[in-house]
Image (cartoon, rainbow, N blue to C red):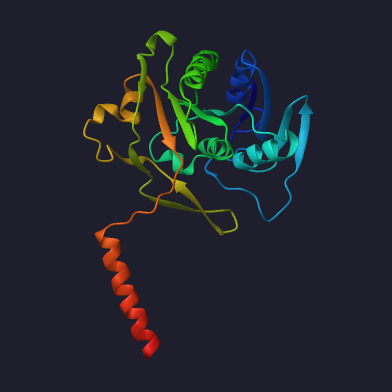
Amino acid sequence: MRILVVNDDGLESPGIQAISEELKKLGEVWVFSTAEDRSGSSHSITLTHAIRIVKFEERVFKVYGTPADCVNIAVNGIIGDVPDLVVSGINLGENAGDDILYSGTFGGAIEGALLGAKSFAISARVRENKTGDLRVISRISLEIIKTISESVKNHDRLVFNINFPYFHSEKEIKGLKVAELCRRIYGEKALRFQDPRGREFWFIGGKEVKVDSNSVIDPSKIDVFLLDKGYITITPVRVEFKTQISDITAEIEKNLVKRLKESLQT
C-alpha cells in the first residue's frame, strides 16, 4: 500500500512526524510537507509562481507551497500515480464545523479525494499549546484508517475528517462518534495594530463568538459538542458542489430574462 502524508504545519511539526511513523505499519509512506505554517490556506493552489521542492531524505520532501500543492505535485509529478491513501495531519488544533472551509489540513485531503485517493484529515484539539499524546493519537488514527479503508468502497470525492479531543491520559477519551458539522464564527472583528513606524497591520481573529447546531435536530451529534465531552469525532464530507434549483431560482431566472429583454430593446 502506498500512502501520501501531507500537512499545513511544516516538516518539523511533531504531528506529521508521529503519524508518518505510525503509517509505516501499513505500507510505503511518502511525506510532502509545507515548508512553513500554511494554516488557513484552505484548498488554494499556487498558479502565479514556481514551487520549490527540497528533498530531505528518501520519500520525504519539503514543498514551498500549500497543502493542495503538496498533494498535486506528489501525485502528478514526483510519485507519478495516485496513492492508495492521502492522510493530511496531524494538525495541531481541531478542524471542526466551519473550520474545514479555511483549513489547509482539510484542503490537502480534498485534493487527495479529487485525485481519486481515499482521504483523511486528522486534527487534535489544543489546550495551553498542547495536544494529547501524539503517539496515542497516531495509534488510534491508524486503526480508524484501516477500518474505514476496509469498509468503505465508494470513496469518490469523500474526505473523512477526524478530530481528537484534548486529553492528559488516553483513559480520558470517552470513545468515538460519527459527528455532524457545526457552524462557528471566529472573532468579533478584525484587529488593527500599528508598527513602530506608524504603519497599520491587521489580524483576523479574537475569541470564538458563535457555535450552533446548523439546524441539526439532535445537538448531541455535533462535532464540537462531542469533542467537549471527550469523544473522537469522524465526519465524512462529500466534496461536491451541486446546483440548487428551486421555485425561487426559477422566479429569479424569469425576472432576469425579462429585464435583459427590456435592456436590449432600449
Farthest residue to the top: give it.
171
> Toward which corner of the image does residue 227 lie, by quadrant?
top left
The number of callouts visible is 0
> Which is more toward the observer, 237 or 127?
237
Please indicate, yes or no, whether residue 125 appears anywhere in the rendered image. Answer: no
Q: Is residue 168 above or below residue 260?
A: above
Residue 111 at what x, y percent from top left?
Answer: 57, 40
Which quadrant, please, contains the C terminus? bottom left
> Taking 198 as reference, is 126 left or right?
left
Residue 124 at what x, y percent from top left?
Answer: 47, 25
The structure residue drawn at horizontal position 44% and vertical position 44%, both measured from the top left corner, is: 240
Please indicate, yes or no, whether residue 184 appears anywhere in the rendered image. Answer: yes
> Toward which corner of the image does residue 100 lie, by quadrant?
top left
Which quadrant, please, contains the N terminus? top right
Residue 175 at what x, y percent from top left?
Answer: 36, 14
Farthest residue to the front: give it.
153
> Toward which corner of the image does residue 216 lie, by quadrant?
top left
> Taking 252 as reference, is 73 left or right?
right
Q: Is residue 92 above or below residue 28?
A: below
> Which is more toward the observer, 18 or 233?
233
The structure residue drawn at horizontal position 48% and vertical position 26%, both measured from the top left corner, is: 153
Q: Is residue 191 above or below residue 2?
A: below
Farthest residue to the bottom: give it.
266
Residue 143 at what x, y percent from top left?
Answer: 50, 14
The structure residue drawn at horizontal position 37% and vertical position 40%, both measured from the top left corner, is: 207
The structure residue drawn at horizontal position 73% and vertical position 27%, both measured from the top left corner, is: 60
> Taking 67 as reference, is 49 left or right?
right
Q: Is residue 200 above or below residue 24?
A: below
